[in-house]
Amino acid sequence: MSSKVYITGIGAITAIGNNAKENFDSLVHKKHGLTHTRFLNTIHKEIFPVCEINLTNDALASMLGIENKQGYTRTALLGMIAVKEAIEDAGIAWKENTLEKKYKTALINSTTVGGMRHTEEIYLDLLEKESQPETNSYIDTHDLGECTERIADYFGVKSYITTISTACSSSANAIMLGVRLIQQGIVDRAICGGVDSLSKFTINGFNTLMILDKEHCRPFDNTRVGLNLGEGAGYVILESEKIVQEENKKPSCFVSGFANTNDAFHQTASSPNGDGAFMAMSQALAMAHLEPKDISYINVHGTATPNNDLSEGRAMERLFGTDDAPKFSSTKPYTGHTLAACGGIEAVYGVMAIENGVIYPSLNFNEKMEELTIQPETETLTGVEVNHVLSNSFGFGGNNSTVIISKVK
């Protein structure tokens, strides 16, 4: 059994950057990706701003060297780009099916949209006329696991492939599963994270729930009214002590603790007192053998919805207190809420915070919540000793996940 599981590579693509470095530069310079959709045809185009990646599907396919893009969904293409960066960042050879030549590798992918973006586009055509070959190539992409299979095939992953869909906690749960598979000796390496593209279904759905903001979202602000949706992908490469030693790698971080709990409170709302969030953070700290005071920075779930921020904030005050609570911020005003991808993207941000000694600022915060004492960081902090980053990802159904990423000493 491998006791310590290291993060040896990271990759991300979002509305604020086509790779991890571009994302980092945008975060520290407070550059957001909010705009009105250019590529998604929705009746809400001019009503709700979103964080859309400014690349067409053709451009995404070109970045991957895919000439015949038929059947490749936007979700799959975004996932491939982020996974490719993470694999190459970890120094792993993957071309010509060499990725698993020496070490068993898992792909644990997460998504909520899957290929829905494309099946939305062809749905009426299927009802009104006989489908054409190009239309047929997207029918099977609706299933969530299809994009996972595409990514696995592209990189030659065969040992262990699975898809997780627990709403907005999905890719945090993917990281947890990857750690457990490595610790149990089932695989040596795991590619973990998530991807989601914008779709009419998610925009319509969140609008129905009345939690979309027509302006720029404001996490933990007293005037917050809702979230902005986004799209993107984020993945980490997890590797065992065996690989790190044999390949003489020098990783900067490892996953020290994690936990998944459930509020059992409501289909979409979090417990008002943050019971599930409190348990997830507490149990993750216990696994990591850390005290609350050891956490350097919290990347909060921070959706800017009235319910989530209150629930998460109360849980943080219960656990960390109000006087010495760690610095915290939400990165969702930069990327939008990327649903299943957010835990993977924010894990990438956690690694970069540790490596660069940086704490990211929240955007658009002006007025402290009347129910809380704590408030988010609003300016970029540099030259900071960041030893342990706690990342929260909370999903519908009360599925609460916390992952702690720690510096290798």
Image: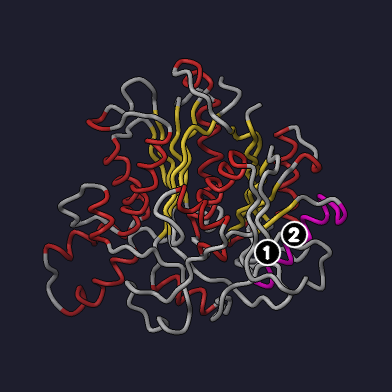
Q: How many marks?
A: 2
**Above or below — where is 169 with respect to 250?**
below
- Disc assigned to residue 270: 1
Above or below, 344 relative to 116 = above
Q: Amino acid at mark 1?
A: Ser
Q: Give the quadrant of the C terminus.
A: top right
Judged from this view, the residue extending furthest toward the top is: 246
| 10 Å crowding of disc 1: few (<14), some (14-19), many (20+) | many
Question: Which secondary structure dominates the residues rendered in magenta?
Answer: helix
Quarter placement of the N terminus: top right
Q: Position of residue 222 (x, y in %)?
A: 74, 75
Q: Please report the residue visible at 47 percent of the width from the left and 21 percent of the height from the top.
A: 243
Q: Is residue 229 left or right of residue 97?
A: right
> Mark 2 touching mark 1, by CB under 8 A?
yes
Q: Nearer the viewer, residue 113 or 21?
A: 21
State yes or no: residue 152 in magenta: no
The residue that disc 2 covers is 274
Tell me which residue sits at (69%, 66%) in the image: 309
User: Which residue does the image show at 64% across and 33% down from the upper left?
Assistant: 407
Disc number at residue 349?
Answer: none
Q: Quadrant of residue 93?
A: top left
x and y percentages locating residue 86 in the rendered image = 42, 40
Question: For numbered disc 2, what is the local secondary structure?
Answer: loop
Query: Is 315 colored magenta in this rendering?
Result: yes
Residue numbers of the magenta segment: 305-323
Location of residue 36 with respect to 343 vertically, above or below: below
Which of 141 and 212 lies nearest the eye of the viewer? 212
Residue 209, percent across and down? Answer: 56, 77
